[in-house]
Amino acid sequence: MPLNAQQLNTATFAELLAETRHTAVHLEMRDLYAVGDEADDYAAFLRTGVPNLDPARSFWPQWMPLVKDAVARGVVMRRARIVSEPVTDYIRYEHAITPLNLLAGEDVRWLPRRSASDIALPGNDFWLLDGRLVQFHHFTGAGDWASDGKERTTDPAAVALCQAAFETVWKRAVPHEKYTVQAP
């Protein structure tokens, strides 16, 4: 059953994704995220240079079933990342763990920031579900979730901006398998 307006604001992302039937696209535009659920794995990567690709660790046990269930229902899940080059240590880490996104069923592409200069982009990362609901993500300057970490809207102008931005980025972006990170 589709969620009503109040439920859209109070539902978890898992509940929103469970209601998604066609597409779920995610645009990431930051060069650093410092969210708590990946802090230990990121710190270990910085020490060793080796990513933890165990899907039973960190946030993956919660994320992978959500994606696999959505993909099994026929939802196409795409994730695009706009990154500065040479990349930050965080982006090297993110690139190294992306095989887990792919294993779950996401398609991931990377766009060097210099190739995004003429794209109208929203001010925040977002998920766009079924081309009708945008969930913006708010972060602090240090990369952790802001106190109002998520904002949802079905406003047609916001949806149109996010749809156009994502599709333009996607067309220009490099598939994960072909993108090589350029470290400093």
Image (spheres, rainbow, N blue to C red):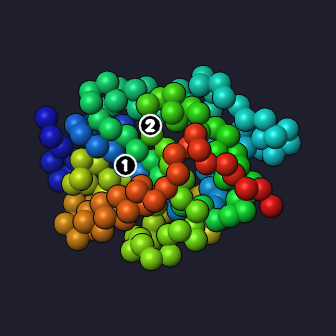
Kind of residue indicated by mark 1: Val
Q: In which quarter of the image is the N terminus?
A: top left
x%, y% of residue 86? 72, 62
**Residue 39 shows up from this direction:** no
- In the rendered image, residue 165, in percent from the top left (x then y), is placed at 37, 65
Which residue lies under the disc numbered 2?
Answer: 106
> Disc 2 residue type?
Glu
**Residue 67, above or below 163:** above
Instruction: Classify the position of the C terminus by image quarter.
Output: bottom right
Q: Is residue 137 found left or right of 41 in the rendered image? A: left
Nearer the observer, 74 or 43: 74
Q: Eyeballing the image, is 110 above or below 95?
A: below
Mark 1 / mark 2, whichever is N-terminal: 1
The residue most toward the right is 47
Q: Answer with left or right where residue 12 lies relative to residue 132.
A: right
Residue 162 marker: none
SS at circle 1: strand
**Residue marked by disc 1:** 25
The image shows residue 95 at horizontal and vertical percentages of 64, 45
Label 2 sits on a secondary structure element that is loop
Name the residue nearer the viewer: 140 or 172: 172
Q: Residue at left 67%, top 40%?
A: 96
Which residue is painted at 60% across and 22% down in the image? 56
Residue 145's quadrant in the figure? Answer: bottom right
In this image, 62 relative to 95: left or right?
left
Find residue 142 and report its image quarter: bottom right
- Of 137 and 82, the residue lying toward us: 82
Q: Give the crowd class for mark 1: few <14, some 14-19, many >=20 residues within 10 Å.
A: many
